[in-house]
Amino acid sequence: MDFDSFYRREFPTMVSLARAICGDFSLAEDLAQEAMTKAHRDWDRVQRYDKPGAWIRRVTINLAISRRRRVLHELKLMSRIGRQPAPAEPADHDSDLWDAVAKLPPRQRAAIAMFYLQDLSTASIAEGLGCSVSTATSHLSQARRALASTLEEANNDA
């Protein structure tokens, strides 16, 4: 497969995956593009992988999680020095479900996104997260329980 075909096939799903983790469409596009830039730079090696799609998922997940950690760290530093951060942009979705997903830890968000948005097996999710199948299953299970609880509370409050 050539890089152009790989890009056309994988880029939209990487944007969806990054969006599920970070909650912002334009940031998700930037993260997916950064992952694709890494793939292009190392294409001679990446194209020989058994599953280059799993590799790009893992890169995208790592970039999204790192970005989130960096932002949280910056917010903590700003609060320590007494500066107020700029107001966050409103989320570009209004679904109660995805609002609840956004509250999950990053690896659980990634697992939910890969399972429900990309219809991946737990083995493929484990590859994407760089963990064992049992850990990926645990992330999915914990995420589902947390989502069920959050959505049930929201329904009871309504």
Image (spheres, rainbow, N blue to C red):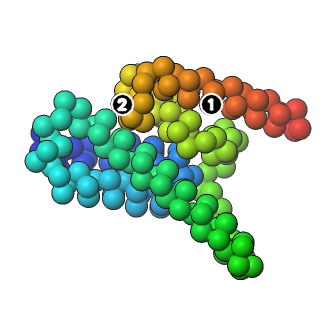
- As rendered, which of 83 and 119 lies closer to the eye? 83
Q: Tell me which residue sits at (32%, 53%) in the image.
A: 35
Query: Circle 2: is it few (<14), some (14-19), or many (20+) Cα within 10 Å?
Result: some
Name which residue lies at 61% across and 61% down: 72
Q: Which residue is mark 1?
A: 143
x%, y% of residue 146?
70, 31
Q: Element type at marker 1?
A: helix
Q: What residue sits 33% from the left and 59% below the top? A: 34
Q: Residue flagged by tag 1: what amino acid is it?
A: Ala
User: Callout 2: helix, strand or loop?
Assistant: helix
Look at the image and tell me whether residue 118 can be seen: no
Mark 2: amino acid:
Glu
Whole-Å distance between the Cαs marked 1 and 2? 18 Å
* Residue 148 position within the rendered picture, expressed as x and y whole percent measured from the top left: 72, 27
Residue, far right: 157
User: Which residue is at 36% across, 41% downward?
Assistant: 57
Q: Nearer the viewer, residue 2 or 63?
A: 63
Visible residue check, residue 102: yes
Q: Is residue 12 left or right of residue 77?
A: left
Which of marks 2 and 1 precedes in the sequence? 2
Query: Residue 17 vs residue 50: left or right?
Result: right
- Vertical arrangement, residue 38 with respect to residue 106, above or below: below
Q: Give percent across and percent down for residue 145.
A: 69, 25
Per the image, the residue denoted by label 2 is: 127
